[in-house]
Structure formats: C-alpha cells, structure tokens
Amino acid sequence: MKVVVIGGTGLIGSRVVAKLRDEGHDAVPASPDTGVNTLTGQGLEDVLQGASVVVDVSNSPSFEEMAVMNFFTTSTRNLLRYAATAGVRHYVALSVVGTERIPDSPYLRAKNAQESLIKSGGIPYSIVHATQFFEFMKRIADEATDGTTVRLPPVLIQPMAADDVATAVAKIAVSTPLNGIVEVAGPQQFRFDELIRQDLRERHDSRTVVTDPHARYFGAELAERSLVPGKDARLGEIRLEDWSHRPALAK
Ligand SMILES: NC(=O)c1ccc[n+]([C@@H]2O[C@H](COP(=O)([O-])OP(=O)(O)OC[C@H]3O[C@@H](n4cnc5c(N)ncnc54)[C@H](OP(=O)(O)O)[C@@H]3O)[C@@H](O)[C@H]2O)c1
C-alpha cells in the first residue's frame, strides 16, 4: 500500500516511515526537505499520485498564535484538497489528548481547527490523540522557564515514547478508517511538576521546578485530568525508566 507521510522526516514521521516499510508498505516521507510543502501545495500532486493513505504528522515551526493557526489550517486545507483529487481513501492525523478541553492554548486551538477541517473534509479519516512525548520534556521545561525557575502545575500527565506513538500511528494508518478519534498514551501516570523535576535532575540541569497550580502550560491553566486520556486509550509499552536508559530509544 502506498502511504504518504507528511512530516515524514520529523521525530514521529521518520519512525512511522520505518515501521511501515518494515511491514512491506511503500511509505513515502514528504516534507520541505523532500520538496513537498503543504503550506504552498508544492510537490503535493506528484507525491500523492497512487497513494491510498495520507498520514499527517507534520508540525508548525512556530507555536506563536497566528503562525500556528495559519500552519495547521492552511496545510490541512491544501492536503485535503490534493488528497481528494488523488483518490486517497484514508486520512490520518496526529493530534493531542485533551485538545478539545484546553481552548486557552493557542497551539491546541490550532490543532482543534485542524481536526474540524478533517472531520468535515469528506475523506474517511482517523485522528490519533497522543499524550506528551518523553522527547518533548525538555521543550516543556524551557517553555515554563523564567530565569532559573520552571513553574508547573501539580496535575496528572501520562507521557509516552515517540517510538510507541509511531507504532500506534503506523498500525492505524493501514487499518480501516475510524471516522473518529483514538487516544494513545504511555503506561504510567506521573505528577507533571515531579516528572519535569526528575527529568531536569537526570539531565544535570540546575533549574528549580516550582509547583504552582496556576502555572500555564503553553498558555493554558490545567485541571487535574486535562492531559490524561480516557479509560479506552491504547497504551504504549515503553516505560519512562526504560526510555531514559536506552539511548537508541531516546532521541
Ligand atoms: N510533542 C508532543 O508531545 C506531542 C504530543 C501529541 C501530539 N503531537 C503532534 O505530533 C506531531 C508531530 O510532532 P513531531 O515532534 O514529530 O514534529 P517534528 O519532529 O517537529 O517534525 C515536524 C515535521 O513537519 C515537517 N514540516 C514542517 N513544515 C512543513 C510544511 N510546510 N510542509 C510539509 N511538512 C512540513 C517537518 O519537515 P522539515 O524537517 O523538512 O522542516 C518535519 O518533518 C505534531 O502534529 C504534534 O501536534 C505532539
């Protein structure tokens, strides 16, 4: 099966391409690096020729409010249009657990807009909601840093390894479209502030994590369960301690 992976050179995309190829599929990575730009439409017609499935695991280079909204809405409109013309039968996109309940976050508002376009786009689809990647912990700390202090709320989080995300996305890509959302998450829950405190300690990073119930996460205040999935989530296998100690998994 020909599967075009938009963002196929990124953290998740490169793993999705490798896993699909291991299963014998014709997985084609597409990104500006390979001459495909979903913002302009460049290269889309060519790369989508003969494709049965499109997997969108691209990400906006900027998380600034206007830029990120423009990225996900413009790229998704273009992709839906070219995919429909090419006769694509399954449109898969990666989004974030809790997207619909955290409207104060400009990034998640943009992901919500992306999802709405897909739902009304006319192509059978599957939307995968993943929790925060282990690989994203440093970016989370940097975003929450003021001087040498990192402020984070004492809410629950159930992060997962990029490798487990890619396994789930690759499997869903070659299955029947769900025309709905599936949640994927890691096998363990943590308290957000404690997780990042532990991660910084392991990186020998001297910043101090301060527990602050009102600290904002990419612009949004969080409730106790904002970031964790429902009971039907598919759980990954890789535990945080295994990921931390296996350099091949940690990138
Ligand atoms: N981080 C998390 O914890 C988390 C949690 C749940 C869901 N997600 C979702 O996971 C997805 C993938 O994240 P990631 O960390 O794998 O991203 P990433 O490593 O930053 O990769 C982004 C990819 O998007 C491509 N891209 C950027 N602009 C493009 C454009 N105009 N046209 C086509 N491709 C473009 C990049 O290509 P170049 O390298 O060529 O620029 C790259 O291949 C995102 O949609 C995000 O919302 C993330």
Image: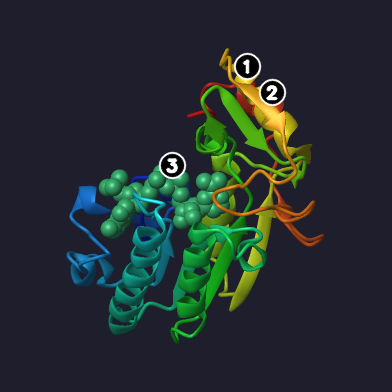
Residue type at the position of mark 1: Glu
Q: Position of residue 91 (x, y in %)?
A: 45, 72
Secondary element at image label 3: helix
Specify whether residue 3 is in view: no
Marked residue nearer the N-terminal end (3 or 2)? 3
Query: Looking at the image, which is closer to me, 37 or 30?
Result: 37
Q: Which residue is mark 2?
A: 198
- Residue 97: quadrant of the picture: bottom right
Q: Which residue is mark 1?
A: 202
Question: How many numbered tags mark residues here?
Answer: 3
Q: Are marks 3 and 1 in contact (CB under 8 Å)?
A: no
Q: Which residue is mark 3?
A: 11
Marked residue nearer the N-terminal end (3 or 1)? 3
Between the residue at mark 3 and the residue at mark 1, the CA separation in whole angstroms equals 22 Å
Q: Residue at x 72, y 44 (%)?
A: 158
Between the residue at mark 1 and the residue at mark 2, the CA separation in whole angstroms equals 6 Å
Q: Position of residue 125 (x, y in %)?
A: 51, 75
Q: Are marks 1 and 2 in contact (CB under 8 Å)?
A: yes
Q: Are marks 3 and 2 in contact (CB under 8 Å)?
A: no
In the rendered image, the vertical position of residue 192 relative to residue 30, given as above or below: above
Q: Position of residue 161 (x, y in %)?
A: 60, 39
Task: State whether label 3 is within 8 Å of ligand 1.
Answer: yes
In the rendered image, the vertical position of residue 55 relative to residue 156, given as above or below: below
Residue type at the position of mark 3: Leu
Secondary element at image label 2: helix
Q: Residue at x 61, y 54 (%)?
A: 220
**Is disc 1 surrounded by few (<14), some (14 to 19) or many (20+) residues within 10 Å?**
few
Q: Residue at x 43, y 78 (%)?
A: 89
- Residue 53: quadrant of the picture: bottom left
Secondary element at image label 1: helix
